[in-house]
Image (cartoon, helix red, strand yellow):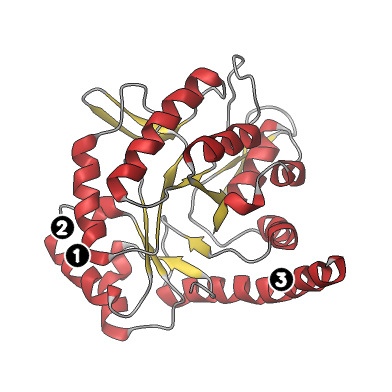
Amino acid sequence: MLSRTGVGLRLPHLEEVVAHRPSAGWLEIHPENFVANPHATELLLDLARDYPISVHTVGVSIGSAHGVDRAHLVRVRRLVDLIKPVLISGHVAWSTHPGEYLNDLLPMPYDDETLAVLVRHVDEVQDAFGTPYLVENPSSYVGYGRSTMNEAQFLTELARRTGCRLLCDVSNVHLSAHNMAYDARAYLDGLPGDAIAEFHLGGFSIEDDGSPGSTVIVDTHGSAIDDAALELYGYALGRFGWKPTLVEWDNDLPTFDALLGQAGRVDALATTCCAGHQERAHVAG
């Protein structure tokens, strides 16, 4: 169904998209922008008649030790029931503490204790939505000494135990591999291809981290997709084949036409890479 690259629909573009109905493959929304905004929800319902919509949660916080915010789950479920999205996803991270929302996606140690917490919370979220939840790999800047498995192993085991699917943010893989000094392609090789249900691509910035000749890549979602991330995306396509792919852009938003241009660039690359993937599969068969 999602045979073309989609784009993130952010509130500044909402009325324009409603008015002009541009040729977008599909649209992703953050439900947190709509659950307390009746006018925006009304416009979204109008769009849902013409476009496949995916829901990408940013406030569910499946990594919070004190539990998932059930009231928020209920609010998001109401929106889900209205728009009937094709995919529902969120982050492997935590962002809440009792009584506080931290407005960030914070890291966790990758060990059995954390895995048990996430298994409980993913099961709860999937029960609430009545569909598999896609969990996204984070952008990483620090790690925990107590981790007993790498990120790919952790995500693989989470998918095995819960039946959740994986949202592979290829740009995050690239920047995390740079920041944490591991091999991005080896990371992708460690993921279970049959569990991957979606790819994300987004812009980032490269900044000086204060050490001579050393840089850190920051997941800003405020620029065009970097060529290095697109190259890694080509590798992912060659390994896993086509998966629904989304262009994310959240800050310093360009025109909606510019987002569609980014999606067209990704579609062209996917057409080339997936043709090669199919040829190799045919030979192997």
What residue is pinned by disc 3?
274
Q: Nearer the viewer, residue 10 or 122?
A: 122
Residue 158: numbered disc: none
Give the structural element (helix, strand or loop) at label 2: loop
Quadrant including the C terminus: bottom right
Q: Disc 3 marks which amino acid? A: Cys
In the figure, residue 84 lies in which quadrant?
bottom left
Q: Disc 1 marks which amino acid? A: Ala
In the figure, residue 173 lies in which quadrant?
top right
Residue 40: numbered disc: 1
Report how far apart the C-alphas of labels 3 and 2 lie in the structure.
Answer: 40 Å
- What is the x, y in percent for residue 90? 41, 46
- Crowd tier of the residue under label 2, counting other residues whose Cα lies within 10 Å: few below 14, some 14–19, many 20 or above: few
Residue 48 vs 147, above or below: the answer is below
| Residue drawn 22% across the image and 76% down it | 46
- What is the x, y in percent for residue 71? 18, 38
Dot 2 and dot 1 residues touching (CB under 8 Å): yes
What residue is pinned by disc 2?
37
Report how far apart the C-alphas of labels 3 and 1 lie in the structure.
Answer: 37 Å
- Crowd tier of the residue under label 1, counting other residues whose Cα lies within 10 Å: few below 14, some 14–19, many 20 or above: some
| Residue drawn 79% across the image and 67% down it | 281
Which mark is first along the chain, 2 or 3? Answer: 2
Q: Disc 2 marks which amino acid? A: Asn
Number of marks drawn: 3
Give the structural element (helix, strand or loop) at label 3: helix
Give the structural element (helix, strand or loop) at label 1: helix
In the figure, residue 275 lies in which quadrant?
bottom right
Q: Horizontal placement of 39 versus 19: left or right? A: left
Q: Horizontal placement of 186 versus 7: left or right? A: right
